[in-house]
Image (tube, rainbow, N blue to C red):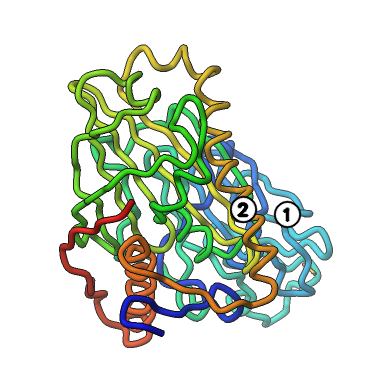
Amino acid sequence: MTSSSTSFSLHGGNSFLRNIWYYGLPAADLKPGRCQAKVLLGEPILFCRTTSGKPFALRNLCPHRGMPLHYGRFDGKEVECPYHGWRFNAHGHCTLIPSLTSDSDVDLKNFGVLSYPVREVQGNLWIFFPANGRNVSEPTLEVPLVPGFSAETQPQAVQKFIFPGHLDQVFINFMDPSHAPFVHGAWWWRKRGKLFEKAKTFDPSPYGFTMRRHPLLRKSWAHHLLGGHPEVEIIYRLPGIRIETNYSDRHTFCFLITLTPINDQETELTATYYWTFPWLAPLKPLLAPLAREFLNQDLRIVAKQSEGLKYKPPLTLIKEADYQAKWYYQLKREYEKATQEEREFVNPLKTQVLRWR
Ligand code: FES
C-alpha cells in the first residue's frame, strides 16, 4: 500500500448495515388487501397492505414450523398460515391458534413474528431493519426524502433491476466518476473514451456526502432537453441511496437510485424519477428505454466485475477519483460503530474538492 492508494476487499464478510431504513418497494406495487413476499438482506419479508390502506411488513416465516406465510391467506387485516391456521396481525402478534381448546392456558403473546417498521413517502415504501433482529416500534431515524418534492408526491416513473453483485460493489459503481467514459458511451449521452478535467466540491450531509450544486459545463443531449442553464446536485447516503437533482431555470428533474441487498451476491436497484416539467410525461415512451439502457450499462459492467471478484483479488482505491468509495467505507464503519455503541452517528467527513479526469 502506498500513501496514494488503499487496498480493500469487495468479497466475503461485507456486512449490511442494520438499524437503518432500506428501500422496500414502490408503494403502488402493494394494493390494498394484498401481500408481496420478498427476500431482502437475506431475510424473508412479507409486505402487506390492509384494506384500509395501511402498509406493514412481517418476517415471512411462521414461528410454528417455518412455513412461509405468503402461501397462506390475507383477509385484509390478518395473515393466516396455510399449515395449521395460526393468524398474525399487522404488529406480528399471534391472534389465533385454532388447535387450542377453550380451557387452554397457552399465552398467544409468546408466538408472534418479527414485524418491521415501514413508512410510505413520495410513493416509496421504506423498511427498517433493526439491529440484532429485535422488534422496534418506532425508529427515530427519518426516512430519506427526495428534496424539493412533498411527502405526498408520486413518482413519474419507476424502473427495477437486479444487479449481480454485493451492495458495496454496486454502490461504489454509482459513486465512481472514472468509469463513465468507458461504460456509458451513447449517442444521446457522450462519446465513449472522452476525458475531461473535473473539479467538484463535496460537503458532508446527513448519513453521507453531497456533490455541491454546480452548473453543467458540458451538456449531454439529455441535459439540452431540460433547457436553460442546468445545474446538478448529487446526494449519496447510507445504506445505498443516490439522489441526483437536475435544475433547469424553472423546473426540476430528480433521479432517485435505491439499492437494497437481496443477499451478498445480488442487489435490487430501483430507479425512481420525479419531475416538474409539464411536457416531459408524453416523452416517457421515448426516454424510459434510454434510461433503462444507461442503467443496464452499469449492470453489465458489474456482472463482468463479479466474474473477477470470485477469485478474491486484492483491490485498490486510488486518489482522488476513488475518494468517494473511501468515504463510503468510512461512513459505513462509523454507522456500525455508532449502532454497536448505541449512540448518535457522527459524520466523519469534511468539505473537500476532488479532481479527476
Ligand atoms: S406452520 Fe404455521 S401454523 Fe403450523
Q: Look at the numbered disc 1 and give the secondary structure of its residue.
A: helix
Of labels 2 and 1, earlier in sequence is: 1
Instruction: Assign the N terminus to one quadrant of the image.
Output: bottom left
Classify 10 Å Cα crowding around label 2: few (below 14), some (14-19), many (20 and above): many
The residue closer to the viewer here, 204 or 354, is 354
The residue closer to the viewer here, 91 or 309, is 309
Q: Is residue 89 above or below residue 333?
A: above
Residue 18 placement (x, y as % from top left): 45, 73
Specify the amino acid type for callout 2. Answer: Phe
Q: What's the residue at 29%, 32% (across, down)? A: 218
Image quadrant assignment for residue 251: top left
Q: Locate ligand 1 by image quadrant.
A: bottom right
Single out the residue that lies furthest toward the bottom: 341
Specify the amino acid type for callout 1. Answer: His
The residue closer to the viewer here, 169 or 176, is 176
Q: Left or right of 297: which side holds 74? A: right
Q: In this view, does 249 lie above or below 115?
A: above
Residue 181 placement (x, y as % from top left): 45, 44
Q: What's the residue at 50%, 46% (across, down)? A: 182
Classify 10 Å Cα crowding around label 1: few (below 14), some (14-19), many (20 and above): many
Residue behind mark 2: 163
Q: Look at the numbered disc 2 and give the secondary structure of its residue.
A: strand
